[in-house]
Amino acid sequence: MPVIDITKDPATCSMTIVCEYDAPVERCWQLWSDPRQLERWWGPPVYPATFVAHDLTPGAFCTYFMTGPDGDTPHGWWRVVSVEPPHGFEVEDGFGDEPGSDNGMPLTTMRVRLADRSGGGTRMTVTSTYASAEAMAQLLEMGMEEGIRLAAGQIDAILEAG
Amino acid sequence: MVVDLLADDARADLVFNALADATRRDIVRRSVAGELSVSALARSYPMSVTAVQKHVAVLERAGLVHKERHGREQRVRADVEAVQAAARLLDDLEQLWRERLDRFATALDDLIDH
């Protein structure tokens, strides 16, 4: 389990996760900066993500869709706010197939920081900030919970088949 | 569904604002464990009964606790379901990211192996 600390602040509707990896900062950065690498882990196993556009330049958009078990393809986008390769970036994170439009869905700000860990490896800090508690509830309601449940179910199926 | 309890935006904001204060979180914690009178609660904090009453009122508006009159005493009882709903919301988010970061670790290992 790479996660070493989680801070949840109901007052600011934000969550900060700190995790550590043995790999150097440059390698961790590749998992965000290379869309083919990003696709391997961004979506849950039953909702894998495909990045259609990926440009980590301030003002640019990254767009993706996820493919669900019933063939549904929810779209999402990031609007890049700032980038400091390989040490991190900040994006506005939205849903819908029209980048930059909230499509009636709440927006989140995601900030990622990659720092050298003393003694080698990387300390990665991800901060997600929601516009309001209601926004947070709405996002979780939108199938995120379902995605988790399906992922857990899939693991069970693999174990049973094993 | 848990989120339904918080789906109404005004309600959700009341809940999270109520839980944003350490004293109020402590009042919730104690009143989940058992019904407590306002005066008993007030003895636990370096503040007046009136100040504690104000905190309880904030929690009551958010639906996290209920007040009941027992003779001359006012007792505070937590609405366990409402408290769990608030906690679950952040827990679900935590779970989502934990799983994502586990996948990140796996992808990182694959990258190093190849």
Image (cartoon, rainbow, N blue to C red):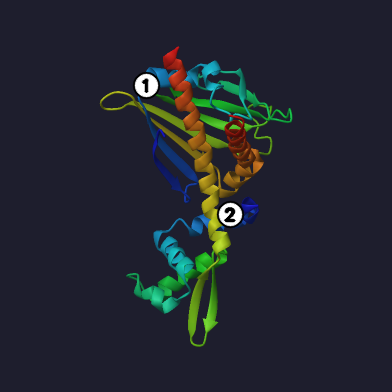
Q: Is residue B75 left or right of residue A140?
A: left
- Horizontal and vertical percent position of residue B68: 54, 78
Q: Is residue B20 above or below residue A118?
A: below
Task: Specify the quadrant of the image occupied by residue B42.
Answer: bottom left
> Which marked residue is nearer to the observer: mark 1 or mark 2?
1
Which numbered circle lies on residue A23? 1
Q: Are marks 1 and 2 on the same chain?
A: no
Task: Specify the quadrant of the image occupied by residue A35.
Answer: top right
Looking at the picture, tell me which residue is in the foreground, B70 or B56. Answer: B70
Q: Is residue B34 above or below residue B7?
A: below
Chain holding disc 1: A
Q: Is residue A13 above or below residue A22?
A: below
Residue in view at x 53 percent, y 21 percent:
A38
Q: Where's the C terminus of chain A, which quadrant?
A: top right
What is the C-alpha distance between the residues marked 1 and 2? 40 Å
Mark 2, residues whose alpha carbon is within 10 Å: few (<14), some, or many (≥20)?
many
Dot 2 corresponds to which residue?
Answer: B12
Residue in view at x 40 percent, y 73 percent:
B41
Q: Where's the N terminus of chain A, which quadrant?
A: top left
Q: Amino acid at mark 2?
A: Ala
Residue A85 can be seen in this image: no
Disc 1 secondary structure class: loop
Which numbered circle lies on residue B59? none
Task: Specify the quadrant of the image occupied by residue B20.
Answer: bottom left
Residue in view at x 49 percent, y 18 percent:
A33
Looking at the picture, tell me which residue is in the foreground, B67 or A118. Answer: A118
Q: Amino acid at mark 1?
A: Ala
